[in-house]
Image: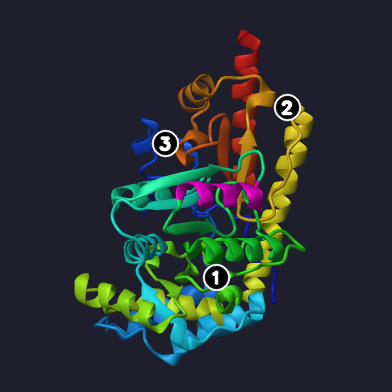
Amino acid sequence: MDKIDFDTVVDRYGTYSTQWDYVQDRFGQADLLPFTISDMDFKAPSSVGTVLRTAAERGVFGYTRWNHADFKGAIQNWFLQRYAATIAQDWVVYSPSVIFSLAKLVDQFSRPGAKVVTLSPCYDAFIATIEANDRQLIQLDISAGFTLEALEAVFAREHPAVFVLCNPHNPLGIAWTHAQLQGMVTLCNAYHVAIISDEIHLDILRAGVQPHTLAAYFNRLTVPCAVLSSASKAFNIPALGCSYGLIPDERQRLEFLYTLKQRNALSSVPYLGMLATMTCYNHEAAWLDQLNAYLDANFTFMTQFLATRLNYAYTVPHATYLAWLDIRPLGVDMAALQAELVDHQQVAIMDGRVYGKGGANHLRFNLGAPRTKVVDGLNRLRRAVDQLTQEK
């Protein structure tokens, strides 16, 4: 395979981009250099454009069936080849998004008012979705480290109905090990806690890190369980609107599909999203390998930059393209730093407080971008820190 060009900057203005065109919604100013929403500034694989153009030339975009071997088989083969996990095609269900599936399964696996545990800092949509669905969210703060003993203590004390896992973890970038997942499974069985694993980041791993999907542990689980994922994160195609779930229990799967089709009237998959998913899973493993290598190099550059320019020792996460930076060693206040970044450096970097318990005094910095953008953003961060420390 030819070398993929991840260095060319793509102008995303005028595409209704949440990250670029609408940065003002969250940061109060337009035209900021954004390192915010977790999508990437890279073009999708060229085969995605090819299959979409072919469909566009055909010109027919009618109601489309997802429940067939081409779609489900592509997912089945991906799990086998990428994660060495054997799944059944019958487990696969379509959903418009991972968070939609999460909302519906939390509703299915628990009753209003029930407790739902997740590990924090956590993806902010977890917080909004779980609480908006009339559940009590219990956040186990793992900012200082995760232990199975701490998780068990929460299960024993809170008696939750559901455990929502982010695998790998966003924003901390933890790639859960076999031992950790096995321990989580054991605890869920022992305390009768359903488990839902959001695995949308599972394809974004540092070199040498092994992926572990909860689907490989389904046969050990005696409680309701599901894996939720999509090709959208790894291949940068979220706008095409296609995700899927793996639900091994037939009754639970049929209940989910009843909710999807009868209660929410979602029976037809976005045709282009389905085509893109199949194309990526069937043909673009090598593209993904090159993407991960490029992201690894971005993390290496950030590590070296922080060490030499800010005397900051940064530890690269095992997964995701999101850097999690503790600003306390920099000796600056978060409110002052955000004001300096936005008002004077014209850069948008996420304040970790958005992500719940353990997020204070942290920045989430999106490295899914060409190196020149990363360099620009880091220089703006450096100038902001320099300005604040000089003022003291």
Q: In the displayed structure, does residue 52 sit left or right of residue 184? A: left
Q: Secondary structure at mark 3?
A: loop
Task: Nearest to the eye among marks 2 and 1: give it.
Answer: 2
Q: What's under tag 1, amino acid-wise? A: Pro
Label 1 with label 3: CB-CB less than 8 Å:
no
In the rendered image, which residue does mark 2 sit on? 310
In the foreground, 158 or 348: 158
Mark 2 touches mark 1? (CB < 8 Å): no
Instruction: Give me the C-alpha separation between circle 3 and circle 2.
Output: 26 Å
Which residue is tagged 3?
31
Residue 234 appears in the picture as rendered: no
Q: Which residue is the site of mark 1? A: 45
Instruction: Please tell me which residue is depicted at 35% across the width and 53% down the height of the picture.
Output: 114
**Badge 1 element:** loop
Up the image or down, 175 lies above or below 390; here it is below
**Towards the viewer: 134 or 99:** 134
In the rendered structure, the answer to whether residue 16 lies left or right of residue 190 reads: left
Pick out the residue farthest to the bottom: 69
Quarter of the image with the C terminus is top right
In the image, residue 147 lies in the stretch drawn in magenta = yes
State which quadrant residue 52 falls in.
bottom left
Q: Is residue 242 left or right of residue 176?
A: left
| Callout 2 amino acid | Leu
Spot occupied by residue 28 in the image (x, y as percentages of width and height): 36, 30
Q: Dot 1: few (<14), some (14–19), or many (≥20) neighbours within 10 Å?
A: some
Is residue 312 something one can see in this rendering? yes
Q: Which residues are magenta?
A: 146-158
What's under tag 3, amino acid-wise? Asp
Instruction: Say which residue appears at 74% left-offset and 30% top-offset.
Output: 312
Relative vertical location of residue 100 with respect to residue 134 in this rendering, above or below = below
Is 353 magenta? The answer is no
Q: Is tag 1's residue or tag 3's residue first in the polypeptide sequence?
A: 3
